[in-house]
Amino acid sequence: NKNFVEAIASLENYETTTFTDFADSSNNEFDKAEERLLIPAMLEVSKNNLTIVVGNTEEITYSYSGDGTVTFTIDSTIASINVSGNKVSITGAGIGATTLNIEALGTYYTDVSTFVVVNVVKANYSITTDGETVYYNTLQDAIDAAKDGDTIKVLEDVTETGKIVVDKDVLIDLGDNKITLDTPIEVSAEVQIVGDDNSGSGGGIGTIENTN
């Protein structure tokens, strides 16, 4: 009869609506429960900021507790990376700033990520010892790293700002390049300065100029 049909239709609508609501609610709760069951992972690096001179390599370490694979991405025009164990070697390739992004996607552990800001600066000086060349951005950096008897080679025309103290017995090979200073160099050691006219490394004559 009419009342029976209406009752059946009402019941069907009620059950359908209730089932849909329950399914949505059940899935959401399942997702939440699944998320709660993930084991917290950890990903840490030894440094979050790094300044590298073009041509030099700096090393950081990382630690990861999880079940995923750790991946590394960086702008290769600025720096290149090499990963060995928990060590990451970063080599300056071009002047500029970039970010080394490190990420691990877990299965039973949470996804984690971290980063290292990498700033690559110009190589203006170099010191070669036992066949290994290290590059420096400033003259003071090169002097601080030098040992008595080392040769600091000037690679480009450079403008230096601030105080420079030479306290090592070094030779500064200007080549045909020019160092422009805004402060006189303070010398407390035996320093030799040569240019291309007597160092034999090129065709010009290097100079040091104090603007004050």
Image (cartoon, rainbow, N blue to C red):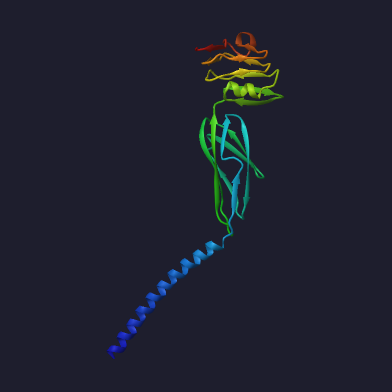
Residue extending furthest right? 130
Do we see residue 1 in this rendering?
yes
The front one of 182 and 110 is: 182
What is the count of numbered marks? 0
Residue extending furthest top? 197
Residue extending furthest bottom? 1
Quadrant of res 4: bottom left
Q: If the image is split into quadrants, where does the N terminus sit?
A: bottom left
Q: Position of residue 184 (x, y in %)?
A: 56, 13
The residue located at (64%, 26%) in the rendering is 134
Q: Position of residue 66 (x, y in %)?
A: 61, 54
The residue located at (61%, 8%) in the rendering is 197
Residue extending furthest left? 2
Left or right, residue 10 beside residue 145: left
Q: Position of residue 194 (x, y in %)?
A: 62, 11
Instruction: Decide: is 100 above or below 150.
Output: below
The front one of 31 and 162 is: 162
Do we see residue 174 in this rendering?
no
The residue located at (70%, 25%) in the rendering is 131
Instruction: Decide: is 29 above or below 103.
Output: below
Instruction: Decide: is 93 above or below 102.
Output: above
Instruction: Decide: is 79 above or below 144.
Output: below
Q: Position of residue 5 (x, y in %)?
A: 31, 87
Quadrant of res 201: top right
